[in-house]
Amino acid sequence: MTALLELDEVELAFGGLVAIGGLSLRVDKGEVLAVIGPNGAGKTSMLNLVTRVFTARRGRIRFKGQDIAQMPRARIAHLGIARTFQNIELFDAATVLDNLLLGRHRFGSGRWWQQILRTPALTRLEESHRAKAEEVIEFLDLSPWRNARVAGLPYGVRKVVELGRALCAEPELLFLDEPASGLNPEETRDLAFWIEDIRTELGITVVMIEHDMSLVSAVADRVVCMAQGKMLAEGTPAKVQGHPDVIAAYLGT
């Protein structure tokens, strides 16, 4: 398969604390990759390196063959990489639709003079952004909450809204940081169906950081287990879950 993302001997340190040490990782185009591991394993730090929240001390990060390890953070979304967060990051006072439209920022909002004159070209651009947001609303069954303020929504719906905002960016690579955290079993099952549809219907490659092994087993093609900033095991969900080093890392034996 074609590699969409490659991490090559990447290191991240905070002072004398090494968060990630010599991590090499490959994400193939069209797959759902789950990254698991105990708390403090470096999973979210790895995601933050790719999305340029942090800067690697050394190593290469290549997206579609281009080294992005030192790229300005603002450029990452323009490349076709989107993400969700462990802690929901939405604008509570805005509606669901308005939050989703924020995901369209990488496609621009017209030139300043077009905004002042309200040109037909700007109108068409805004209509295209709204049409894409409406497609995502339909895709994620968010229609009942389209015009509701985020602050008044149930936690599970807010998680879906954040997923929708990421999808509005039309990414090629989507990072989901603990998407099932705080969801009930029914919401987790819905999430599993959406992740599969995101891959098959939208053609988006998914990297999911997750602790819920039932979700991992249901949707992941491949699993990587991290511990202490390094890769501990890699393979199918069943193979990784049964790996003695993985069991020892989780149980502390």
Image: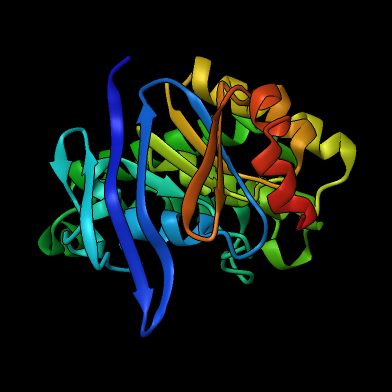
Residue 59 appears left or right of 144: left
Residue 125 placed where, x, y %? 27, 41
Residue 193 seen in the figure: no
Residue 86 occupies quadrant? bottom right
Residue 9 seen in the figure: yes
Q: Nearer the viewer, residue 163 or 18?
A: 18
Position above or below: 39 against 128: below
Residue found 21% across the figure and 42% down from its top: 62
**Picture colour scheme:** rainbow
Residue 1 occupies quadrant? top left
The residue lying furthest to the bottom in this view is 15
Q: Nearer the viewer, residue 123 or 234?
A: 234
Residue found 57% across the figure and 68% down from its top: 91
Residue 131 appears left or right of 62: right
Residue 22 placed where, x, y %? 33, 54
Residue 172 appears left or right of 32: left
Residue 100 placed where, x, y %? 51, 50
Position above or below: 95 against 141: below
Residue 71 appears left or right of 25: left
Q: Nearer the viewer, residue 46 or 153?
A: 46
Indicate the quadrant containing the C terminus: top left, top right, bottom left or bottom right.
bottom right
Residue 178 placed where, x, y %? 64, 50
Tag count: 0
The residue lying furthest to the right in this view is 185
Position above or below: 253 against 92: above
Residue found 18% across the figure and 42% down from its top: 121
